[in-house]
Amino acid sequence: MLRDITIGQYYQTKSVIHDLDPRVKIVATLAFIICLFMVNNLTGYAVAAAYLVAIIYLSHVPPSFIFRGMKAIFMLLMITFLFNLFLTPGETLVSFWIFNITKEGLILAGKMAIRLIFLITGSSVMTLTTTPNQLTDGLEVLLGPLKKLKVPVHEIAMMMAIALRFIPILMEETDKIMKAQMARGADFETGGMIKKAKSLVPILVPLFISAFRRANDLAMAMEARCYHGGEGRTRMKPLMYRHRDFVAYAAFIIFMAAMIVCGRMSFLV
């Protein structure tokens, strides 16, 4: 399960998507998430699916590697699906005990599941094709106007990039701790919910200690290199828009227009 978590990882390869400016990918990902909640019909979801397929194909990232991350959110996906299925009022299709499955609940559960899958997939493509340094620079430039309001833009971007970078590191650390505990006779599979929750204690304690130690080492390393925030700092690779970035913006504007049309169609219907 831990190895199936792909968020925060970078898949190194050569592709058109990898070469795009990080600002393009960040803006496109945020707009894509917004567009997912603008449509409410199969046509809009089909357009979004075609867009994702094209992006995955151009990224040269194996689809199996991208969709492997879905295993990590399977429980969240099922909880979202079941809550919408059983708690949405409407025309009853099936009734048993205290639960009622309605037509509206079935439709809403399906739509929310599709949106969640597309959202995770789109976000994973961005993180898999963008290095943490590129994400930091892109976020800092995009949030630059907030500096006039005394918002610590560089620090916010740095924290987000470090958090993404630490996800695979902590997952690897968790895997090592679990294997060490299993070698000492720990059992994480059998028993009820309470027993499984108690069995996590020998994992969480050393994991938190390791996380704090890594955070302290990182802080000391940054201080040793005279890091004092973003004021007056320069970049080794300044961000510059190129022809392919404007082409990507144009292609995404066309996609957004199609999604808006689909959203208006569902609204009129």
Image (tube, helix red, strand yellow):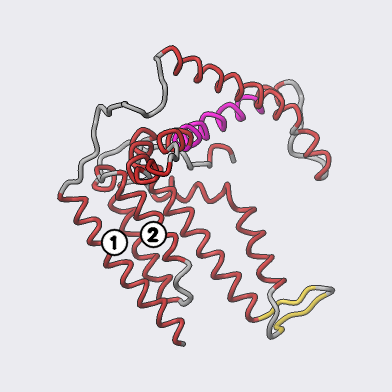
Q: Locate residue 252 relative to residue 109 in the image: left or right.
A: left
**Vertical placement of residue 12 versus 145, above or below:** above
Q: Residue 92 appears in which quarter of the rendering?
A: bottom right
Question: Pointer 1: residues within 10 angstroms few (<14), some, or many (20+)?
Answer: some
Extent of the magenta region:
160-178
Majority SS type along the magenta span: helix
The numbered mark at residue 252 is: 1
- Say whether residue 162 is magenta: yes
Mark 2: which secondary structure? helix
The residue at which mark 2 appears reads as: 31
Going from N to C along the chain, the mark reached first, 2 or 1, is 2
Mark 2 burial class by Cα count in 10 Å: few <14, some 14-19, many 20+:
some
The residue shown at (55%, 21%) is 214
Expressed as whole percent of the image width and height from the top left, the position of residue 145 reads 35, 46
Residue type at tag 1: Phe
Residue 203 on image: x %, y %: 70, 28
**Amino acid type, residue under disc 2 in the picture:** Ala
**x then y, percent, for residue 37:** 48, 67
Kindly indicate whether the residue at mark 1 contacts the one at mark 2 (C-beta within 8 angstroms): yes
